[in-house]
Amino acid sequence: FNEVPSGYPEPGKTTVYDASGTIDLDSVALNGSVLVKVLYLSADPYMRGKMRDASVQSYSPAFTLGQPITGLGIGKVLKSEKEGINAGEYISLPLIEWAEYTIPPVEILPYHEKIVPAKGVPLSVYLGALGMPGRTAYHAWKEFAHAKQGETAFVTTAAGAVGLFVVQLAKMQGLKVIASVGSSDKAELAKSVGADVVFNYKETSREQMDEILKKEGGVDIYWDNVGGSTLDVALGNANSRARFIECGMISGYNNKNAITMQNLMRIITQRIAINGFIVSDLYPKYNSEFNEIVPKWVLEGKMKYTEDRTQGLEFGGEALLELQIGKNTGKKIVVVAEE
Ligand code: NDP
């Protein structure tokens, strides 16, 4: 991480690929930790929020200038001095360095998860549908949706890692799904998993979005990944006792310009429940259920997913930017090495 961006993160400026460091894999000291060969890294929207001045407080610490960025990733353990983690195992870690090889600080090792991929399921899927984004969708839907027969859900970034999962959850419960996406290919993808009404928000004015939601009878569950004017239009069309699941607000991550909210009063008049959450809060409650159910759905093809792979750590900066500008379709993965 090289420089705090004011807008979109620029590869080569905000993030730089530094190939100067080397470690001697045979003699490096582990000091009670493990040596990991990094295989897959997860590029996630929240990482933009960590590209900030360290003095600005948030739920997740800022990246440190001059240090490798960190995030969710999967690697193979080459050597271990940590009881319970063995050479040859695959593990995921929450704060893995964006590097080819890494020795994680011992403090983060308790948060590792062993990954034994189900037959036919690529390891990288444990960063997507079977990882944090899948859990985000599953856990928060379970906690906040309270879906009832005949209701309508409006899902934003419906072709993304979280959004595509949410569309399928809503369809499993028999809801009508309105989906917004940023391209015609993404619209096709959202339709292919059952979204009933799909529109490209880039070609839809605020007034047209309002008309679409009105025509469909309003919104009972709003899954917000974008915030901004879409949230405002959703508020304007919320049915009585609607549930708003406030997952993300990516429209503001790279652009801090305030938008004018016209419909905030509807929170009161429509008795809307606004539910903000950070997925890790919900892990203790839903992780075992998720581990029991969702891998089976994925294997049976009941829960579809897509991945958008960037090959090579040297293009990690591009991967982070592509995610923010919507060039990804599905879970953005940086492939550092296949094995
Ligand atoms: P996605 O795979 O959905 O990728 C991000 C997508 O955001 C892009 O592909 C793009 O799709 C869309 N996007 C980018 N800019 C804008 C914009 N200005 N307006 C509308 N859409 C935009 O990412 P994830 O599935 O990983 O994450 C989705 C959301 O969920 C994010 O907001 C993220 O921060 C949030 N999240 C929250 C968590 C929590 O604990 N609360 C945990 C995980 C994720 P398009 O082409 O459709 O514009």
Image: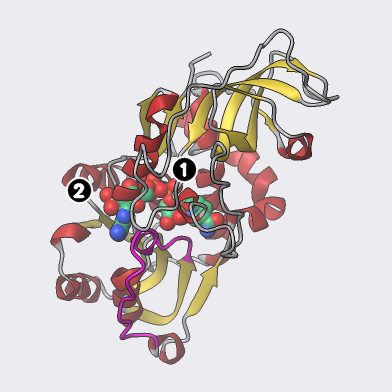
Q: Which mark is residue 255?
A: none
Whether residue 158 is visible here, answered yes or no, is: no
Colour convention: secondary structure
Q: Residues within 10 Å of mark 2 (few under 14, many from 20)?
A: some
User: Tag 1, which secondary structure?
Assistant: loop
**Could you tell me the amino acid type at mark 2?**
Ser
Q: Is residue 163 magenta?
A: no
Q: Where's residue 73, x and y in %?
A: 56, 33
Q: Secondary structure at mark 2?
A: loop
The Cα atoms of the two marked residues, 1 and 2, are separated by: 32 Å
Q: Are marks 1 and 2 in contact (CB under 8 Å)?
A: no
Q: Position of residue 265 (x, y in %)?
A: 39, 90
The amino acid at mark 1 is: Asn
Question: Can you see residue 42?
Answer: yes
Would residue 279 be found to the left or right of residue 273 on screen? right
Identity of the residue drawn at 60% across and 23% down: 75
Q: Chief secondary structure of the magenta span?
A: loop
Label 2 C-beta lies within 8 Å of the nearest ligand 1 atom: yes
Q: Residue 183 has which mark?
A: 2
Q: Is residue 184 above or below residue 267?
A: above
Rate crowding at label 1 as few (under 14), some (14 to 19) or many (20 or more) other CA atoms within 10 Å: some
Question: Is residue 259 part of the magenta span, yes or no?
Answer: yes
The residue under the point 61% across, 61% down is: 59
Compare marks 1 and 2 and give the one earlier in the sequence: 1
Query: Of all residues shown, which one is farthest toward the right?
Result: 83
Residue 237 at x, y percent in the picture: 30, 79
Task: Give, as a single range, the part of the protein colored magenta.
Answer: 246-264
Q: Which mark is residue 2?
A: 1
